[in-house]
Image (cartoon, coloured by chain):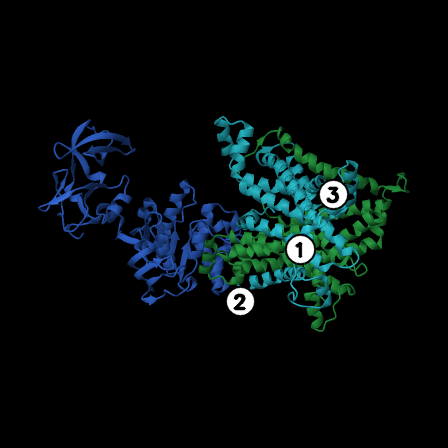
Chain colours: A cyan, B green, C blue
Amino acid sequence: MKRLIPLAPILYIMFLMLPIYWLLNMSFKTTNEILGGFSLWPHNFTLENYRTIFTDPTWYLGYVNSITYVSINTAISVSVALPAAYAFSRYRFLGDKHLFFWLLTNRMAPPAVFALPFFQLYSAVELFDTHLAVALAHCLFNIPLAVWILEGFMSGIPKELDETAYVDGYSFPRFFFKVFVPTITAGIGVAAFFCFMFSWVELLLAKTLTAVEAKPIAAIMTKTASSAGYELGLLAAAGCLTIIPGAFVIYFVRNYIAKGFALGRV
Amino acid sequence: MAVKTENQKAWFFILPVIILVAFNALIPLMTVVNYSVQETFGNNVFLWSGVRWFEDVLHSERFHAALGRQLMFTGIILAIQVPLGVAIALTMPRQGPWVPVCLVLMALPLLIPWNVVGAMWNIFALPDIGLLGRSINAMGIDYDMTQQPYAAWFTLVLMDVWHWTSLVVLLAYAGLISIPDAYYQAAKIDGAKAWAVFRHIQLPKMKQVLTIAILLRFMDSFMIYTEPFVLTGGGPGNATTLLSIDLVKIALGQFDLGMAGAMSLIYFLITLLVSWVFYTLMTRDDPN
Amino acid sequence: MAKIGLKSLRHSYMANPSAEEDWALRQIDLDWSDGGAYALLGPSGCGKTSLLNIISGLLTPTEGQVLFDDRDVTALPPDQRNIAQVFQFPVIYDTMTVYNNLAFPLRNRGVYEARVDARVREIAEMLELSDMLDQRASGLSADGKQKISMGRGLVREDVNVIMFDEPLTVIDPHLKWKLRSKLKELHQKVRVTMIYVTHDQTEALTFADQVVVMQDGEVVQIGTPVELFERPAHTFVGHFIGSPGMNVLPCEVRDGGAFFNGIHVPVGEGVGRTEGARQLEIGVRPEFVHFADSGIPAEVVKVSDAGRHSVVEARANGSRIHLLSPVGAAIPEGTTHLAFDPARTRVYADGWLTGKGG
């Protein structure tokens, strides 16, 4: 029994890779070949699907749009979360515990509840169909998350650091940016990773708040799926391409994955 | 952890966060509340209707059915993903060159856009050209997600297990590797068997991360929308119409504002309540 | 009870050790007799924890044998060796009460409940834990938890040897001596072989009947605390034990006599064999150096008050010599002379003691 145990992670990973492989398989076939028969690998290997995506603006702009609003959101979320997390970590003030709790409850808000109200709200402020709209909307979930993660990391830094800096004559902004922030780069990395992750994968709000200009790739894919005729090969290729940014990001933080989760602050 | 100093000026630090989150939370919530207590006959004419919508929702069979499906879904999900995730984490090596590779590959499903997950499994489960669909049918079992509710549920659960178990694995693994070797050594000397080691050392030390894992999986599975929507559209019929899907249908599809408003509030409240109950139960004897 | 023998033990943590430095333990041959209280003393990295883990079975040595009562147990896992080990930080089962923690090793071995109860209460009594038996173990303070760790080792009746790996590391200083005396008391009562690993000489010297001093993976000296103090077999032992440590001065040997800076230094037991040695040194503890009218010319540089005596630092031609001066005694200023007690002066060749029996 003991010798079989290393097998478990391997089997699990194989299970995970299977649907991804199938998608990859289809992305290299023409739609005709896919519909025409069943094969475990492409018999007529083609890059046509990928070529379409890279040359047709309606497709590749989708990726550009998605990356844009995700980046904006991550930047905003982490930036505003930093001072807030510092406050929660270092200070006691009226209503601090309740505020923190309220922030966390937003993570529990069903996006479906907000679909219609967001649609009306962002139309009212004339931000409909902009990258900023989606970036701001995602703040609802990502800011509480970022504050939670950063507060966890900051609480691990002893207050003596702050006090030493004051004694040494640092002004607060200088202390914060030159002394404090460098000590929590791991935390910032983890927070940014999770903000990126949640914003990149979310579809409902992203689709609701966009029409043409800021349409994310996810919405373009669903449009294609429902229009006449399943362009399966194209769909598969588009899907495969969406996996790449995620893979990149995980690769970069691979050494922190265990550590970041270890903080138990996901 | 140092003692916090009292400083009311801290509110300035938090102001940007409050503004952004309140803008996104309070205003829509007020809109929802607004809709839930009013009735409209079009042309922006609104009439107060009190708790009528709430009564309608709470008594509607449609809502009960959707809630029932949702609870069943969440229940099945938790029952599978938590033990499975912990089991896999237990079998992973605690150190070595393969660990980062394993972790990266396991984390991959977590970063795929949710609609792609749905689309991927939709294709994967097609009876003629999908690997899964074809294989099951080849084994003699009649399998077609678009026709049979059981097939749809099976695929839905399998997809979610595929999608999210890794989150539990990563969290449980992080908890496990934080256990110092001395505990295992002491247990060996005490003559403890593998099950005793799990029960008395590993499980207690994983309590914190498991709480977070269970809480997260509960919340996210309760709110799930995109993946099942792309996978089955809620069908066949409304066999897999979970709460979020139904709500969006009512809100954005039928523009039934009153009903949507009331349902939204009830939905949110249920989520909050159950999360709070879970959280309290699990951190009951934890001073943290 | 068991006699423990270590034969030709060598251990390396590397897969293919080649150079001497690759070996954490180099050639250990030791015998530990039944019921003794031993200390394994040495600086960090000298191999003492490795040696401990080899004895307990948590580590399998690269070469050599471990014998319990002349039986080869090198391949046996810890739970079959009848040993117990207490670690640096308290290892307890958080979810169990103190009672169940102590009972755990017995229950795992199928001891029947009545016996378990008797043993647990007996050991709890010894460790002064009796009124905490029903409390959750996680609620105790650090020293309480360490007592539970010790208790789990004592509660088993088949234990041959209990090993302590720097067990007082996380204990508050004012509680350390309490636990130390408790350990000594336990040893006298229970008479189980105990091996105590530490880098703190006070802990080692107060606990042990026999101290094994290690450095760089080798045993440098075994002896009673008095022997280690009076007759260090290696300059390292002299230097490591005692505060301040032994004075080590470069010397020359001519015609059977030792000379420091050209001045003859009488050595009570004789100079011993020194041929082929690259480095010759004289060792004498500050306790046995005193001011004199003739002898080694030196200049007093610094006087520190150490409570019961003063530590005087003197310089003789570039070498530092420490000596102890009683409280109130007059300390000559400037240049003076120092003399060493010949009976306590030793000669060392390449660090090792020469002379009779050296």
- The foreground one among A217 and C349 is A217
Q: In this view, does A262 lie above or below C4?
A: above
Choose top left, top right, bottom left or bottom right for residue C12: bottom left
| Number of the front mark, 1 or 3 | 1
* Visible residue check, residue B113: no
Q: Earlier in the sequence, mark 2 or mark 3?
A: 2
Marks 2 & 1, CB-CB < 8 Å contact: no
Front residue of B157 and C245: B157
Q: In this view, does C353 lie to the left or right of C72?
A: left
Q: Is residue C236 visible?
A: yes
The chain holding disc 1 is A
**The residue tagged with tag 1: helix, strand or loop?**
helix
Report the residue marked by disc 3: A213
Earlier residue among tags 2 and 1:
2
Q: Which residue lies furthest to the bottom in this view?
A: B140
Residue C238's image quarter?
top left
Q: How crowded is mark 3: few (under 14 residues within 10 Å), some or many (20 or more)?
A: few
Mark 3 is on which residue type? Glu
Q: Which label is found at residue A50?
A: 1
Callout 2–callout 3 Cβ contact below 8 Å: no
Which residue has dot 2 on it?
A: A4
Label 2 to label 3, Cα distance in Å? 53 Å
Check chain identity for marks 2 and 3: say if they share one. Answer: yes
> Where does residue B276 sit, x and y in percent of width and height?
68, 47
Disc 2 residue type (three-letter): Leu
Binning the other alpha carbons within 10 Å of mark 1 as few (below 14), some (14 to 19) or many (20 upward) gives many
Query: x, y percentage for residue B158?
Result: 68, 61
Mark 2 closeness class: few <14, some 14–19, many ≥20 residues within 10 Å: few
Task: Tell me the quarter of the picture where residue C5 sits.
Answer: bottom left
* Vertical arrangement, residue A200 with respect to residue C10, above or below: above
Check disc 2 and report its element: helix, strand or loop: helix
